[in-house]
Amino acid sequence: MSSRHKLDIEDGDRKRERDRRKSRSKSRSPRRNRSRSRDRGWERSRSPNEKPRRSAVEINPFSGQPYTQRYFEIFKKRTTLPVWEYKDKFLEVLDKNQCLTLVGETGSGKTTQIPQWCLEYCKARTPPGHRRLVACTQPRRVAAMSVATRVAEEMDVQLGAEVGYSIRFEDCVSERTILKYCTDGMLLREAMNSPLLDSYGVIILDEAHERTLATDILMGLIKEIVRQRKDIKIVVMSATLDSGKFQNYFENCPLMSVPGRTYPVEIFYTPEPEKDYLEAAIRTVVQIHVCEEVEGDILLFLTGQEEIEEACKRIKREIDNLGPEIGELKCIPLYSTLPPSLQQRIFEPSPPKRANGAIGRKCVVSTNIAETSLTIDGVVFVIDPGFSKQKAVAAPYQRLAV
């Protein structure tokens, strides 16, 4: 074989070997690309109609933690409150005015929702690194505590952290607190150290119709603060309010009215005045519990601690004397000097039915603290003798009639 033929054969072998290598590299390259696309999924091309995936975890902007399932359950209930549909209108009026008067019926949700909206307003308009608090005053300690507890649950934060309360002898706040419920007296005490209340962006005066001495002094102080601080917002709220006087006092501020839930109501009066209204009220409670076939709790208004404790003892004795065939009736007292842990009993569920079908109820025996400051779910029957103890201011000072 000639040397030329040998060279041709060697060149042909080399060419065929190169072709085999190229074919192998081409067959491997798709697998290499596929594995790379699996390792780096973000490089995968997306079809025009495909939407980007949204993270399934929503973060609470106040706590920095993921929302719990309980938050979404409560949020659905919040959207059913009568005040909820007025959120955009409220924020618009608040943005355009320094003072605002809001009248909302009991149960409309104003005490729990309005402060949260004000907090959103402050957060959106406060520069990074700065903090402005929202204060909501209550005339009674039990209202400040119970509402703060509820709002902390609605915001999915810990009570005493982002949401807290401040009452006499108890201060449940921290450096992280941005929404504080407090009695009007505690905010007035705070104003002694900070006359312009510089740490607050919004101050809400709730239950303004109560017109305690601390509330009236606080209103005078706030009117002066409004003149000196153009960056503060004031909201005056109540269930029953002479809006004209408050509008004039705060230089014709706008008025918002929020309706409450309406239910069919039947009102019954005694034919003639009762000589012993306490005895008549106790008798009516027992009669309702024994005779009424409609499920629902009872709310009895009395004047003070002594009457309330006496009524609870007598009602319990009357029910016990009727025997076990009668459904259980749990009497719960409520007045301002009651320890906070006992005040929270009004939110406990009613006793269940007995085996024979007898209805279990709870009977809340309260001062007028339960009239507007608190909303107790499940109450169907209300007994009101028409008496209450009130602190009056001597003439020539004018007091708002309730």
Image: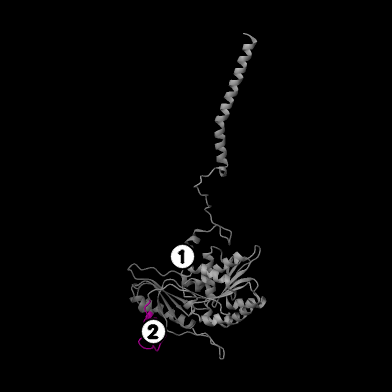
Q: Main secondary structure of the magenta part?
A: loop
Query: Would residue 150 be seen by someone viewing this image from the given angle?
Result: no
Helix, strand or loop at disc 2?
helix
Label 2, residues with CA under 10 Å away: few <14, some 14-19, many ≥20: few
**Camera-side mark, 2 or 1:** 1
The three-letter amino acid code for the residue at tag 1 is: Lys
Circle 2 residue: 280
Q: Which residues are magenta?
A: 265-284
Query: Would residue 305 be seen by someone viewing this image from the given angle?
Result: yes
The circle on residue 171 is none
Q: Nearer the viewer, residue 231 or 354?
A: 231
Left or right: where does residue 283 sit relative to residue 96? left
Assess whether mark 1 and mark 2 are in contact (beta carbons under 8 angstroms).
no
Above or below, 263 relative to 52: below
Helix, strand or loop at disc 1?
helix
Q: Is residue 266 magenta?
A: yes
Q: Nearer the viewer, residue 249 or 167?
A: 249
Q: Nearer the viewer, residue 313 or 283?
A: 283
Residue 198 screen position, x and y as percent:
65, 72
Circle 1 residue: 77
Above or below, 92 relative to 210: above
Residue 24 in which image quadrant: top right
Marks 2 and 1, the one that precedes in the sequence: 1
Q: Residue furthest top?
A: 1
Q: Spatial distance from mark 2 to mark 1, Cα to Cα? A: 38 Å
The three-letter amino acid code for the residue at tag 2 is: Ala
Q: Residue at x 33, y 69 (%)?
A: 357
Report the quarter where the N terminus lies. top right
Residue 348 screen position, x and y as percent:
45, 69
Residue 6 screen position, x and y as percent:
62, 12
Label 1, residues with CA under 10 Å away: few <14, some 14-19, many ≥20: few
Q: Is residue 220 magenta?
A: no
